Amino acid sequence: MDQERVSPVRRLRRWLSALAVIWLVIACGGGVGTGGTGAFASGPITGFGSIVVDGVHFEESGARIEDDDGSSRDRSDLHLGTMVEVESGEIRDDAATASQVRIVSALVGSVTSVAANALVVNGQTVGINAGTVFDDRFPGGLAAIAVGQVVEVHGFVMPSGGVIIATRIEPKDGATEFKFRGVVTALDTVARTFDLGGQHFSYSGQVGGSGDLANGALTRVVVAIQPNTQGRWVVTSVGRTGPGNVDRNQAKARGVIVAFTSIANFVVDGFTVDASTAQITGGPLASGLRVEVEGRLQAGVLIAASVEVEDNNHHDELELRGQIASLDPLAKVFTISGHSERVSYARTDIEYDKGTEADLAVGRNVRATGLLSADGTLLEATRIRFDK
């Protein structure tokens, strides 16, 4: 019997049905190489109104705030210089709505020495520069920190020598455990020992996350506050850093290249990066360089569209936006509602937009931009704009 002929009308219907299925897959975010929806960003907070990370304003009022152990935190724990990882919806016009903000500090421990531009905390050097923010509980900045104090350090982890370039330092009184973040070396899975940041560690087989330990991996470890008799920090938990094995159609990261194999395989602050097709500014790339990377996540790998090399001493323009909560006209300092950060309007080169200094008053909505003061404790405004 002759095979059934397919009429042109039926062929057209089949073609339209197939097209509809393809369109549905695309609309739902599927398709080869499209990646998951939403965005992931990491870096220090450089502004408020909504939090500003990597130049993006993330509205975080409805987001879950947590630390890198997964414990819930409060929005009041977010400050200028705090290192965070942000999960959000799509970034449009440098703005997005965050679903989760994770606080990822680099070090918690006891101060053993204080120098002009550095601290030593738990044996690790903490570098201080013009971009280091000091909590307001350290009046005067570095000069207020004493040997023996316990502090929490946010910052960029360098690949060797155990150095952290601090973006923020705050007190951590009453800490019952210490924390390190760095690159694992000298791992011995038989003796269950390893090094990190020039310090020595030991762990038991029952420690959560210990199976993820690997030489060259950027890792977070929590330890007891006293080393053992061999001088090793005793690990109580191990945590991975970075986004995990996820897809996102947008990703941004600021950090230091802690491991460099090739342009198609290097690590920035917990991200494995493939920049083989990226536009690179300020290269060539190498371990130890501070970079800003933008692209997409594919199975946890940041497929970079652009990589920009930054000066390791680069400090950001900061921004505080909102309603003036308190005003000291003698000191020429004000605060913004909901934030402890202080804004100085004492600079002689300050510019005002849509108002003058005389218009500063409690309850007025303003946007102040500027740089850190020399002691790192307040924002020195170079421009103040009045908003309705």
Image: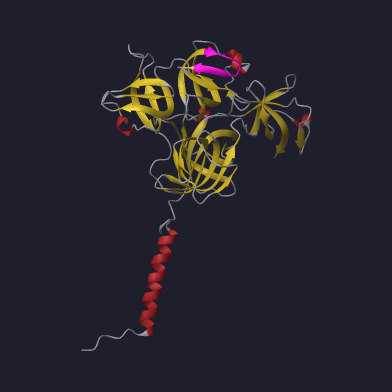
Where is residue 119, by image quadrant? top right
Q: Quadrant of the N terminus?
A: bottom left
Residue 90: percent from the left, percent from the top?
A: 51, 49
* In the foreground, 259 or 341: 259
Most common SS among magenta residues? strand
Q: Residue at x 57, y 45 (%)?
A: 95
Residue 8: percent from the left, percent from the top?
A: 38, 84
Q: Is residue 111 visible?
A: yes
Residue 111: percent from the left, percent from the top?
A: 49, 14
Q: Residue at x 39, y 47 (%)?
A: 299
Q: Is residue 351 left or right of residue 47?
A: right
Q: Does the stretch in magenta take in 114? A: yes
- The correct choice, above or below, for 323 with respect to 56 in the image is above
Residue 98: percent from the left, percent from the top?
A: 50, 41
Q: Is residue 91 left or right of residue 384?
A: left
Where is residue 231, by image quadrant? top left
Identify the image's colour scheme: rainbow, by chain, secondary structure or one colour.
secondary structure
* In the foreground, 129 or 81: 129
Q: Residue at x 40, y 65 (%)?
A: 22
Where is residue 330, by image quadrant? top right
Q: Which residue is the extreme one toward the left?
A: 1
Span colored in magenta? 113-120
Q: Which residue is the extreme one toward the bottom?
A: 1
Q: Residue at x 65, y 32 (%)?
A: 323
